Image (cartoon, rainbow, N blue to C red):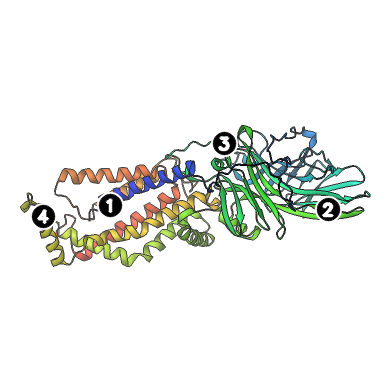
Amino acid sequence: MDNRRLILLFTLAAVFYLLWNAWENQFHPVLPPPPRTRVTATPRPASPLPPPPGITPSGGLPAPRAPSLPRRAALVRVHTRVLRARIGRAGGGLLDVALLRYRKGLSPQSPPVALLHARGPGRLTVVTGLEPLASSPAPGANAVYTASVRRVQCLRGCGDLTVPLVWRGPNGLRVVKEYVFRPKSYVVRVRYVVHNGGDRRWRTAPYVLLRGAHVHRNYSFFNPKHLVYSGLGYDRRGTYHKISYHHLRHHPFERTLRSGWITHVNNYFLATLIPPPGQPWRYFARNLRGGLYEAGAVGGVLVVPAHTTRRFSLRLYLGPKLQRRLAAVAPGLRQTVDYGYMTILAEPLYGLLAFIERVVGNWGWAIVLLTLLIKILFFPLQRMSGTSMARMRALQPRMRALQERYAEDKTRLTQAMMELYKKEKVNPATGCLPMLVQFPIYIALYWVLLFSVELRHAPFALWIRDLSAPDPYYILPVLYAVTLAGYQRLVPQMTTDRLQARLMMIVVPIAVAGISLFMPAGLVVYWFVGGVFNILQQWHINRLVGISRTGRA
């Protein structure tokens, strides 16, 4: 079989596959729309769960009036070894969180990744509070807290950092909201201590939500990261579900669950709200005016009798998608590292790659060793393929003679070639089998490089400083094209037209190199190392079969 045509076929298939994924991400809603029904003005049944914050009794969604941004003096600043955060005393929410171990660029002077930020495009903040019920006062989104500290930090040699915010209401009502940070953890615990010093019971509902602005993304084949999902998601019975902005514009989301979480994700980081398990919470997401959205969870009615104190807490995960950590934070949270249809291959491939990296200490060398391991694993199949191609190369003079003899009779030519293959016990399809088997591995490794934060900004050697990004100097694609051209010179040519053969020798490497220009450097390292291995293997097989460079046995 003509391997150059097969390579072109796979290249076109990869292009159509990437374009199809881009179309799915941009236009296909993740959640199926519910059936359209006419809304009647019937009263809602009694429920132990209050509606989401800001929803009026009639069920309308008024435009929320967000609290004005606080002044510098109205902020509490927190600095740990992994996080830098700002907490607003107006509303008591997390306005900014920067991830100190992850920077926007490769330069050490590059600013850290801002997971939460209250200004600018794509802004995202976390708001927690208590929703007032039955005209009872409560510290909602516009409450003003007092804080005994303005700055806390723990860089080394200290325990948990606790930031207490105090709100005082009428009739002896006192609410203390505490943010608890651990020095090297991305989990932030929010604890509430509610003391009712009055003579009447107090009713409220806890809530936690994400407020953000959706940014329209430009989709382009020349930027492979356009395939990455960025948006909302939630957990339902241990399964991760996505909530697309396209769907949310027309259909507000609402579920009542006893355990789970709701999150905002991108390819490397996530901000996750984790209510306490075992209690019913109403999860919701809705689109607001001006490209804004709101997503979160509301707990059941909390009743605090007179002269009593109640305590409860919830957790936030604000950090990278470190797969070994996510599984310990919450059930199903690791599924946010979403490899899509390639999960069945990508997860074990990542596990093997991570194991090798822990041994050698470098992700680039781990990819090299993984390539060699896969090549050794498929060596029997590759050897059978190489032997078949070597024998076909030895048969080329006889095939050219048949093509010249039956140039005007294609049917007779095909019959003669099949008889020659049968007589010499050569199967042309055998040469394509290793490529067919290994092609899904290429796609799975591409997904691993695109979605694994462990490989983000991971250096290899020399000029390769980020295995998850394309080669900035295009050296690897050129090297890969050279190896492909060298491999083509060792396998049989399936055409008698010398001009056509030379054209294929030029077009195929250039086409594949053009595709690899936009691929992560780690994937091109895999291709290049595999290409060198293929050349050495085919050269050795050709010598064993006993054919020369010209194809004569």
Res 157 visible: no
Query: CA gap, disc 4 to disc 2?
Result: 87 Å
Q: Residues within 10 Å of mark 3 (few under 14, many from 20)?
A: few
Residue behind mark 3: 215
Front in this rendered view, residue 242 or 325: 242
Q: State the image coordinates of residue 315 (x, y, percent, origin top left).
A: 71, 53
Residue behind mark 2: 303
Q: Amino acid at mark 3?
A: Val
Left or right, 357 with respect to 152, comes to left
Residue behind mark 4: 411
Query: CA gap, disc 2 to disc 3?
Result: 40 Å
Does label 1 or label 4 sit earlier along the sequence? 1
Q: Residue at x 33, y 46 (%)?
A: 12
Q: Residues within 10 Å of mark 1 (few under 14, many from 20)?
A: some
Image mark for residue 6:
1
Q: Is residue 376 above or below residue 452?
A: below
Query: CA gap, disc 4 to disc 3?
Result: 59 Å
Tell me the mark number nearer the camera, choosing from 1 and 3.
3
